[in-house]
Image (cartoon, helix red, strand yellow):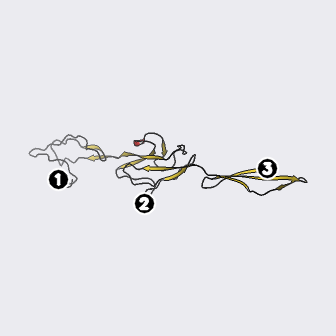
Amino acid sequence: GNTASVSVATNGNMTYRAIPYVVVNNKEEYGDASNELTINPVKYTVTFNSNGGSSVASQEVPYGGKAVEPLDENDKPLSSRTGYDFGGYYTSQNGGGTQYYKADGTSARSWNITSNTTLYAKWTANKYTVTLDNQSATNAGTISVSATYNSAMPSATMPTKTYYTFGGYYTSTGGGGT
């Protein structure tokens, strides 16, 4: 007779071990475990295109396995980008295709692509409420606007003040700043 066992190592390798045995006087006598076969899973390189965020190292992922949480060049989870929220890594630009990593860096699915692949970071620009201080204008104009990071400021109705010419909005009072 024979007995067999299969074990899976932490690196994903599977070992199949067949051990021959015979029954002598109602007792099993085992041979050695020299009949051993180790199967190494196919691994694929996953490259991360951070699309303007901090760079993330590529990694090897076994088919059917899950990659580890991506880290940027400072060993911080995921990629970061000023003024944007991270939305995960996808097989196509701008969040298109299949998502493989969630926004929190956890795996969204098992690896099922049979080639080396590039995954793309999805970014959503942050929106901010900008309060427009009219400096005691006669006609207030627009009081606030919703501005999107790295985009043109939205249109606003300019304030008016008797005997004054409006010179624009700045980051400091009296026309200072930017």
- Which residue lies at the image location 60% right of the left edge and 50% below the top edge? 41
Secondary structure under the numbered disc 2 in the rendered image: loop
Give the labeled residue for mark 1.
175
Rendering coords of residue 106 (x, y %) = 51, 49
Give the labeled residue for mark 2.
74
User: Badge 2 local density, few (<14 within 10 Å), some, or many (20+)?
Assistant: few
Instruction: Give the Cα distance between marks 3 and 2.
Output: 52 Å
Residue located farthest toward the bottom when viewing the structure as drawn: 74
Q: Using the image as rendered, state which of residue 1 and residue 71 is in the foreground.
A: 1
- Asked whether the residues under the numbered discs 1 and 2 touch, taking CB atoms below 8 Å apart as contact, a structural biologist would say no
Amino acid found under the numbered disc labelled 2? Asn
Residue 69 visible, this angle: no
Instruction: Give the Cα distance between marks 1 and 3.
Output: 89 Å
User: Badge 1 local density, few (<14 within 10 Å), some, or many (20+)?
Assistant: few
- Asked whether the residues under the numbered discs 1 and 3 touch, taking CB atoms below 8 Å apart as contact, a structural biologist would say no
Rendering coords of residue 123 (x, y %) = 39, 46
